[in-house]
Image (cartoon, rainbow, N blue to C red):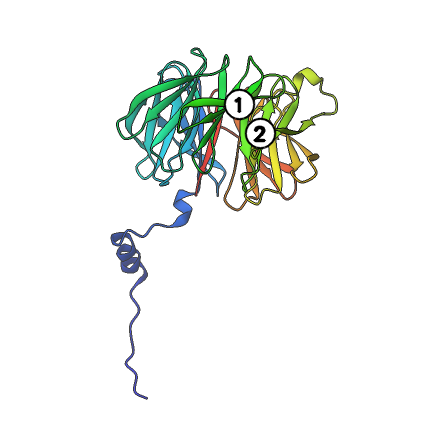
Amino acid sequence: MHTTARHPLPIRPLFAALLLTGFTWSSQAQVAYVSSEKDHKLTIVDLKTQAVTGTVATCKRPRHMVITPDGKQLMVACGDSGQADVIDLATRKSVKKIGLGDDPEIFDLTPDGKTLYVSNEEDGALGVVDLATGKRTGEIKVGEEPEGVLVSRDGKTVYVTSEVASLVHVIDTATGKVTKNIKAGKRPRRFAMTPDGSQLWVTNELGASVTVISTADHSVLDTIKFEVKGARAADITPVGITMSADGKRAFVGLGKANHVAFVDVASRKTTDLVLSGKRAWGLALNKAQDRLYVANGLSDDMTIIDVPGAKALKSVAVGRVPHSIVVVE
């Protein structure tokens, strides 16, 4: 058979051709964004090198962050600006601001990306924002000092914690009405939901515990108590929580106890306690689920934890009073 020899493109022209077609190396996007309440910026940490590579200026007192459903933008709640700063992930630039009302902290988006629900602590209300217009369209009164907000995967229900009332409010998104109040532990803060949507886990900051709720009938299934050797119960203050993609393990930041608890979801037992920085707060997992990133609010750093080995690998300085972490891969 006759064949014609083909000469491969030189490496540099090939690389240039890839750039022209819009090709990007996946490693360029493997970063963590960490919000800094005191520095009014987001710190960018490269997940490969585990080093800070830059910052993004944002509005005043950035706290909670959420990636939009299309994966293109990062939304940041700025408590002292009363806004959401919308960051384009491709350019890492702010593209617009959306009013959220007074003292916004935690928010969530509906699965279609059309509506934002945000806790407004001073007003004792859940704010409703239409993202197409950027307008606040209403509010739903809940208990005092609402914080945690989580929209169900079907978008039909939104859950809100009230720190003062020690309640989880269940709200029908179609009617905007509270349909049930669930008694949680003392000062409930944040949520995580199992991947199958059957269980809602809520951290109780002053109860040193997590309340496990059935989403089928909104009954309380269990209360998981935490203990840390050498720590007083008052210093075990769970706030941040996240769940593994397979739903087998939950990770809970124990606040002033300076540890993260690894919890087996099936047995609801703590399997490991990993030392982090001071006031372990916001948590995020990478896509491979082998690294857990922890924002430490009082040591101004982020601890990187090896999940299979249940051990801290490194802490990276990230700015003053880090609040939340979002991983982009």
Res 213 visible? yes
Residue 61 figure quarter: top left
Per the rendering, the mark at residue 191 is none
Residue at 67% x, 40% y: name it.
266
Q: CA distance from mark 1 to mark 2?
A: 8 Å
Instruction: Give, as a three-letter code, the residue at label 2.
Output: His
Report the front residue among 316 and 298: 298
Q: Nearer the viewer, residue 18 or 168?
A: 168
Left or right for 159, reference 252 = left
Question: At x 35% / y 30%, what residue is drawn?
Answer: 115
Position of residue 173 measured from the top left corner of the image (x, y, whole percent):
41, 28
Task: Please name the residue shown 62% across and 39% down the image.
Answer: 249
Residue type, numbered disc 1:
Lys
Disc on the earlier residue, 1 or 2: 1
* Figure disc tally: 2
Horizontal and vertical percent for residue 41?
A: 39, 24
Mark 1 lies on residue: 180
In the displayed structure, does residue 160 sit left or right of residue 23?
Answer: right
Q: Quadrant of residue 73?
A: top left
Q: For mark 1, does the 10 Å Cα neighbourhood hold few (<14), some (14 to 19), or many (20 or more) residues?
A: some
Q: Report if the CB atoms under discs 1 and 2 are less than 8 Å apart.
A: yes
Instruction: Read off the residue under disc 2.
Output: 218
Mark 2 packing: few (<14 Cα in 10 Å), some, or many (20+)?
A: some
